[in-house]
Every structure is written in structure tokens, then in C-alpha cells.
Image (tube, grey):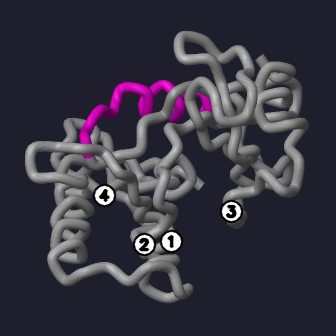
Amino acid sequence: MMQELKSATANFRPDNILGEGGFGYVFKGWIEENSTAPAKPGTGITVAVKRLKQDGLRGHREWMAEVHFLRQLHHPNLVKLIGYCSEGDQRLLVYEFMTRGSLENHLFRGRMPLSWSSRMKIALGAAKGLAFLHGNREHVIYRDFKTSNILLDLKQGRRGTKPMFLHGLLEHMVMLRQNMSRQGT
């Protein structure tokens, strides 16, 4: 799978970088619709591939447990984790691609300004995503809620555009189980 994701991102080419954070780089890539096989740019499904930095990686077992937990989370206001890859010291997460970038870019970086109506829909969507996490039986607390982690998409719903999604859950969550807490950092 590592080779497929390398091909899907043109060998993690710098011009495919969508963003960078403390945990790694996010690359734009393309995969076939029903598999992780690489597709030509502009065809298949566009994905965001997060390549985690090797320094500071948690233990493999803990990371895998969190990945499996995240794969169980399904909500319209959370970015979907499509898959993952762990080979040697390389760890990759494959997410659905959010076509309009981050809320931060729209508010502070000169992208097309958002109407007040859109801002309210985004705030409501982000709140619904957080409420889902907090109300989950595992009681997930998302510790990195900020405009750069609210990603926007052009999903069409009954009321038009649905631009509300959270990002970066794996790296910034605390799962509370009974009286014990486990940090996802």
C-alpha cells in the first residue's frame, strides 16, 4: 500500500503539499474509486494523504487502536478516514479531500469571503461534529478546535452547500473510558 500511496501523491512531491502541521505533511493525491490503486491526477477520487513525522511517533499498538477507533466514527460533519498505511517507520492516513480548504484560509488568508449565512452554517456544522464526538460512547474530546482544522467542502444537501468538517482528530483527541483518560498525542 505504501507504493500505491507514493504513486498517488507523485512520490510525495512538494507541489502536492496541502498543508503542514506539528504531526506531518498533508499531500493531495488521487486513487481509483473502489481501491487504493493510484489514479492519474484529475481522475478517480481526490484524497488527502497525511504523512506523519517519524519523530515522536507513539507505539504501533496504540496508534493502530486509535486508527481503528476513528474508522468507526461516521458523521456528516467529520472528515472521513478512508484508510491508513503503516510500513516500517512510515505511517500514513488517507482522508477524503475537502475541496474548499480550511475555514482559516477563507477568514484570514484572502480567499473568497464567506457570507454571514455561510459562517453560521459552518459554525453549526462544527458544533454538530463536536457534539457527536462528546456524545459518543467513548466520550472523545477534541483538543485542537481551530479554524485551520475546520475544512470546507461542496457537498450538496437539501439546503445547498454543506461546508462543515473537522480534521486532525487522531493527533488531538482524548478518549475518556470510565475513570481513565488516554491522550491521542
Q: Are marks 1 and 3 in contact (CB under 8 Å)?
A: yes
Question: How would you rate the neighbour count of disc 4 (Cα within 10 Å): few for under 14, some for 14-19, many for 20 or more?
Answer: many
Tell me, yes or no, whether the two marked residues, 4 and 2, touch with CB atoms within 8 Å. Answer: no
Span shown in magenta = 61-76
* Residue 69 left/right relative to 51: left
Give the residue type at disc 1: Ser
Quarter of the image that includes the C terminus: bottom right
Whether residues under marks 2 and 1 lie with C-beta atoms below 8 angstroms apart, the answer is: yes
Q: Amino acid at mark 2?
A: Leu
Residue at which label 2 appears: 103
- Mark positioned earlier in the residue sequence (2 or 3): 3
Report the residue marked by disc 3.
19
Q: Evaluate if marks 2 and 3 touch, with contact meaning CB atoms under 8 Å apart.
A: no
Q: What separation in Å lies between label 4 and label 3 (alpha carbons)?
A: 19 Å
Counting other residues with Cα less than 10 Å from the Cα at mark 1, is it few (<14), some (14-19), or many (20 or more)? some
**Disc 2/disc 3 C-alpha distance (Å):** 13 Å
Q: Badge 2: how crowded within 10 Å, few (<14), some, or many (20+)?
A: many
SS at mark 3 in the image: strand
**Residue drawn where x is 52% and y is 44% of the image:** 97
Dot 2 falls on a residue whose secondary structure is: helix
Kind of element beneath mark 1: helix
Q: Nearer the viewer, mark 4 or mark 3?
A: 4
Give the secondary structure at mark 4: loop
**x, y percentage for residue 76?**
25, 41
Is residue 65 shown in magenta?
A: yes
Q: Amino acid at mark 4?
A: Pro
Residue drawn at point x = 46 percent, y = 48 percent: 182
Along the polypeptide, which appears first: circle 4 or circle 2? 2
Disc number placed over residue 148 in the picture, else none: 1
